[in-house]
Image (cartoon, rainbow, N blue to C red):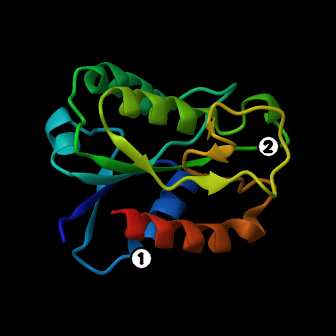
Amino acid sequence: MEKIGIFYSFNSQKTKLIGEKILEMFKEGEIEAINAETVTEEEFLKYDRMILGVPTWFDGELPNYWDEFVPAIEDLDMSGKKIAIYGLADQKSYPENFGDAVGLMANLLKQRGAEIVGETSTEGYTFESSRAIKNDKFVGLILDQENQARLTQARLDMWIKQVKENF
């Protein structure tokens, strides 16, 4: 099995915590962590299977470090890549753009030829709208540590099982 690359900010608290949990859910040597704040095109293209940590900032925006990498992604051929995306969002404070960053990143990568895996149900969440929804499902895993932290581990367990099957 080829090594999986997991990309997230090593300096963010919640996204990093989830990234570290995901690392523990794979066998040693099966997955490698890369800091999304310093990732290069070469590092990004090194993996055919990737997990990206993409929290939603402010009013539905990508974090600065991903936003700054978008021009590089726009020039990459992502054909043959399978990518799963998780993100943190707050459905009570930002119900009108809940988890938007996951949708923004998924759309960008899909336009570049990547296959997005790991869709999840929207059931159990209360929000107005989200760019992360396609065909009535989230295109990745959205976690709300602010309001539903007690549900995180079960959601993560189900998602990782699905991601492993799709990888």
| Three-letter residue code for mark 2 | Gln
Residue displayed at 49% across by 67% down: 162
Residue 13 appears in the rendering: no
Residue displayed at 83% across by 40% down: 127
Residue under pointer 1: 24
Quarter of the rendering occupied by the C terminus: bottom left
Residue 95 appears in the rendering: yes
Residue 99 in percent (x, y) is at: 65, 39
| Three-letter residue code for mark 1 | Glu
Residue 93 in percent (x, y) is at: 83, 37
Left or right of residue 26, residue 72 in this image: left
Tag 1: Cα neighbours inside 10 Å, few (<14), some, or many (≥20)?
A: few
Tell which of 21 and 123 is nearer to you. 123
Question: How much space separates mark 1 and mark 2, taking CA atoms?
Answer: 27 Å
Residue displayed at 75% across by 44% down: 90
Give the number of marks: 2
Question: Are the residues flagged by discs 1 and 2 in contact, CB closer than 8 Å?
Answer: no
Earlier sequence position, callout 1 versus callout 2: 1
Quadrant of residue 42 within the rendered picture = top left
Residue under pointer 2: 91
Q: Residue furthest front?
A: 135
